Image (cartoon, grey):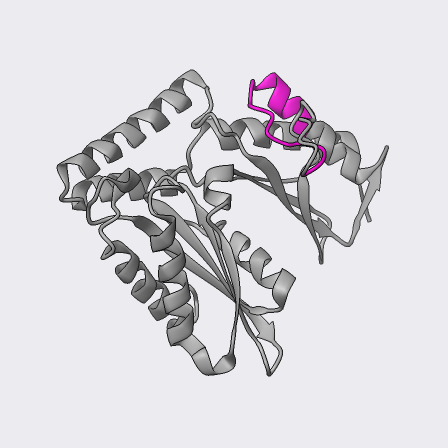
Amino acid sequence: MREIHVQKITAAVAELCRKANYFLGEDVVGALQKGLQEEVSPAGRDVFRQLLENARIAREEEVPLCQDTGSAVLFVDLGQEVLLTGGDFNEAINEGVRQGYRQSFLRSSIVSDPLERVNTGDNTPAIVQLRIVPGEKIKLTLAPKGGGSENMSAVRMLTPAQGAEGLVDFVVETVTRAGASPCPPVVVGVGLGGNFEMVALLAKKALLRPLGEPHPKAVYARLEREILEKINKSGIGPQGFGGRITALAVHLETAPCHIASLPAAVNINCHAARHAQIVL
C-alpha cells in the first residue's frame, strides 16, 4: 500500500490546468502542420498558419490558447493499492482547479445552477471520471472542454439493424450540421456501444487518443478513415471558409452493449484539442 497526500493531487491538477491551456500537444501541432501542407484553399491555408502562430505565441508567452478555457474534465485512474491521506479526494481536485485557473489567469466558465446562471468564479466544480485500476499510482488526465464544440455533440440510440452504415451517416450528419460552430478543423470523438450514459463518455475518451492513432481493431480503423474522408468531402474547411480539411482526425471507442441496442455518440473537439497528463 502506497500513501499519497491529497495535497499532491491539488498541486498536480493546478499544473495540468496551466499546461493544458497554454501548450498545444505536439500531436496536434503536427496535425496542423500536415493540414497546412495538404489544404488547397488559400483561405484555409491562411487559417492553418494563424492556428500554428497562435499555438506558438501561447507556448512562448504562456498565455491561453483560447479565451474559452473550458470546463475542467478530469479522467482519474486510481490505483487500488493507493491510500489517500490528508483530506477529501474530490475537494483536492477542485482546489487544484481553483488554484490552476486563478493563478494561470484562465477564464471561469462554470455556473452553479443551469438556470440561475451564477458563475462560481473559480471554474469549479470539476467534472471527474474516476476509474479504479490495479497498482499503486494515480494517473490524472485533464481535458479542458470549450462550450462551442461541446454544444455540437450528440447522442443517438441507433438500432442494431442500422449497423456501421447508420453510424457513419450519424457522425457525418452531426459534424456537417455543426458547420463552422465548433471551430474546425475539428477532432471527432465517436462512442459506440455501452448504454445511454456510457456512450457519451466513450466519445469523450476517444478525444484523448494521440491524434491520428488508429483504432487497434481493423474494422474500426477502417470506419475511422471512412468517416474522416466523408467529413472532409463536406467542403466546410478550416473555420468554415471552405477547403479540403474539416477534421484532423476521427477516433472511435467501443464497449459491449445490449442485444437490442446500438448506442452512438459524437463529441466534437475544436482545433485546440487540449489535454495534459501526469502520473503520481
Q: Residue at x 47, y 25 (%)?
A: 67
The residue lying at 41 percent from left, 24 percent from top is: 59
Q: Quadrant of the C terminus?
A: top right
x then y, percent, for residue 251: 42, 58
Horizontal relation, residue 163 to residue 193: left or right: left
Q: Is residue 279 visible?
A: yes
Q: Is residue 39 left or right of residue 264?
A: left
Q: How many marks?
A: 0
x%, y% of residue 28?
37, 41
**Residue 225 horizontal/vertical position (percent):** 31, 63
Q: Quadrant of residue 34?
A: top left
* Viewer-nearest residue: 138 or 260: 260
The picture places residue 137, in percent across and down from the top left corner, at 69, 47
- Residue 121 occupies quadrant: top right
- The range drawn in magenta is 97-114
User: Magenta stretch: residue 109 in it?
Assistant: yes
Identity of the residue furthest to the right in this view: 86
- The quadrant in which residue 260 appears is bottom right
Question: Most extreme residue toward the front, as rendered?
Answer: 115
Relative vertical location of residue 188 with respect to residue 252 in this rendering, above or below: above
Q: Nearer the viewer, residue 150 or 202?
A: 150
Q: Is residue 214 visible?
A: no
Helix, strand or loop for the magenta stretch, by majority: loop
* Residue 100 drawn in magenta: yes
* 78 shown above or below 198: above
Q: Residue at x 49, y 29 (%)?
A: 68
